[in-house]
Image (cartoon, rainbow, N blue to C red):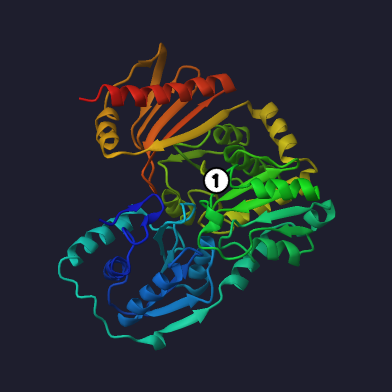
């Protein structure tokens, strides 16, 4: 089975992700997204630093070329937002990148991008899944190689030129900020660090080699995974620590003192900064699982908020058609339409650096200022493994009517993405299946830490009761 979740198709290498499946999925993409017709057809194929990613990319490129379609294959691994940039730069008809983003090293997968440089939405990937199922029984996996159609390319200069024009480098240089960059052995090495260095910003870089196993950890910007970044910041006295996940589309920010900043606060701070200093005036996109602090900032600046289900692919079309100018997802996803219609962890790190430089305050101090202006919000997410039994339980329980939980009155129920319950007073909890791995995500937010902890406890209690009372 092949399924495109909230961020592409993913699975365990050798079990779910095999060379035959890669070629089958690629053929399904060509049949549905790039059928034979008039005009040029070009696909850009990229890959991350994971085991077999480059080989999967070359296998897909050979198949695409065998279908009479031109292929541009980068000379090295690239961040996912760089693929988006390259598609727009070359006016390609589609892009494919082999990556499992922040998942553990044993995972790999594929993200499909449209000609608009956005992660393909469900209306594009659903037909791909259907075509894959049609091909499986009789596909012979034979094609005529056309290696002359595969041409190497370097999308780095054009991508960095976008950032060069967007960021206030003079303000950063004048501030005297020092930065430590940690790409977590991923694709943003020699991107985020290089553009900072080229603009005269003092930078220390760690984990900037290619490692398919990411040092033995998942390439995710969590507190545990950023221990080395924290240590180096303390040793050097750096003002900021900037990290990106395995494919560079998510961020992690450590403030002065090596304190990891919660991603929702960072999203809200950047939105506030762009609205105050950079003229952001359009609508703001937020997923159902993202903090209402984003809404509070938007209201403060008179901006409209558009809420979607989880998955940055839901924002892409809205960023392209002008409905949104800014998009935020609690899992450290940020997009600004002036840059790309896609999330970009490199951009996020640079915007935070500019914000700290211009405001002359630490991220902590800016957060304190923001809470004084718009109120306090405390958010937390946790997760548990998704078993087959629990999956069946969730399908039924998500549909049940819940009027109160432990005496707390439910004033709104949202079933678009799992089950979200909003209580009197504004606190909320959400239980949903993850779209990229076999997990159940539990979210809670309140106006105090005590309320947040209580709501997260209620979410865990609900899940536990569903399991115990399953019949």
Q: Is residue 178 left or right of residue 382?
A: right
Quarter of image, res 268 = top right
Q: In what element is the residue under mark 1?
A: loop
Of 278 and 22, which appears nearest the observer?
22
Q: Residue at x 49, y 64 (%)?
A: 48
Q: Is residue 248 visible?
A: no
Q: Residue at x 68, y 49 (%)?
A: 229
Q: Is residue 392 left or right of residue 283?
A: left
Of 285 and 120, which appears nearest the observer?
120
State the image coordinates of residue 395 (x, y, percent, origin top left).
26, 34
Q: Residue furthest front?
A: 216
Above or below, 411 against 147 in this view is above
State the image coordinates of residue 285 (x, y, percent, origin top left).
50, 43
State the image coordinates of residue 228 (x, y, percent, origin top left).
67, 49
Query: Which residue is disc 1 drawn over?
Result: 332
Point out the image quarter for the C terminus. Answer: top left
């Amino acid at each position: 089975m092949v399924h495109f979740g909230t961020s592409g198709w993913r699975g365990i290498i050798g079990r779910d992700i095999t060379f035959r499946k890669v070629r089958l999925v690629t053929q399904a993409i060509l049949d549905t997204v790039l059928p034979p017709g008039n005009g040029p057809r070009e696909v850009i194929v990229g890959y991350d630093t994971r085991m077999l990613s480059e080989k999967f990319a070359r296998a897909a490129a050979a198949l695409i070329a065998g279908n009479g379609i031109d292929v541009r294959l980068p000379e090295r691994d690239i961040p996912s937002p760089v693929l988006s940039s390259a598609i727009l730069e070359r006016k390609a008809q589609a892009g494919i990148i082999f990556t499992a983003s922040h998942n553990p090293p044993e995972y790999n997968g594929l993200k499909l991008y449209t000609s608009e440089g956005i992660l393909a939405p469900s209306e594009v990937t659903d037909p791909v899944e259907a075509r894959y199922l049609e091909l499986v029984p009789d596909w012979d996996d034979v094609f005529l190689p056309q290696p002359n159609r595969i041409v190497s390319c370097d999308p780095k200069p054009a991508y960095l030129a976008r950032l060069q024009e967007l960021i206030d480098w003079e303000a950063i240089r004048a501030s005297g900020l020092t930065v430590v960059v940690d790409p977590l052995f991923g694709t943003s090495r020699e991107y985020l660090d290089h553009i900072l260095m080229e603009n005269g910003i003092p930078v220390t870089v760690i984990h900037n080699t290619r490692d398919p196993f990411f040092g033995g950890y998942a390439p995710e910007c969590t507190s545990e995974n950023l221990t080395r970044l924290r240590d180096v910041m303390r040793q050097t006295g750096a003002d900021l620590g900037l990290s990106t996940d395995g494919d560079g589309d998510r961020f992690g920010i450590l403030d002065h003192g090596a304190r990891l900043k919660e991603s929702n606060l960072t999203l809200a701070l950047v939105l506030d900064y762009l609205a105050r200093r950079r003229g952001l005036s359009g609508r703001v996109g937020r997923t159902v699982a993202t903090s209402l602090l984003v809404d509070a900032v938007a209201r403060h600046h008179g901006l409209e908020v558009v809420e979607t289900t989880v998955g940055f692919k839901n924002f892409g079309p809205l960023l392209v058609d002008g409905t949104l100018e800014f998009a935020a997802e609690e899992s450290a996803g940020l997009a600004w339409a002036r840059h790309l219609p896609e999330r970009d962890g490199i951009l996020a790190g640079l915007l935070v650096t500019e914000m700290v430089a211009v405001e002359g305050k630490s991220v902590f101090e800016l957060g304190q200022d923001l809470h004084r202006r718009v109120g306090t919000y405390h958010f937390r997410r946790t997760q548990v493994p998704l078993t087959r039994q629990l999956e069946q339980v969730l399908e039924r329980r998500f549909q049940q009517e819940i009027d109160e939980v432990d005496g707390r009155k439910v004033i709104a129920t949202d079933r678009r993405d799992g089950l979200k319950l909003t209580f009197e007073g504004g606190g909320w909890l959400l239980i949903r299946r993850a779209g990229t791995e076999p997990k159940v995500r539990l979210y809670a937010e309140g106006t105090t830490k005590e309320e947040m902890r209580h709501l997260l406890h209620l979410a865990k209690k609900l899940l536990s009761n569903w399991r115990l009372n399953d019949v």
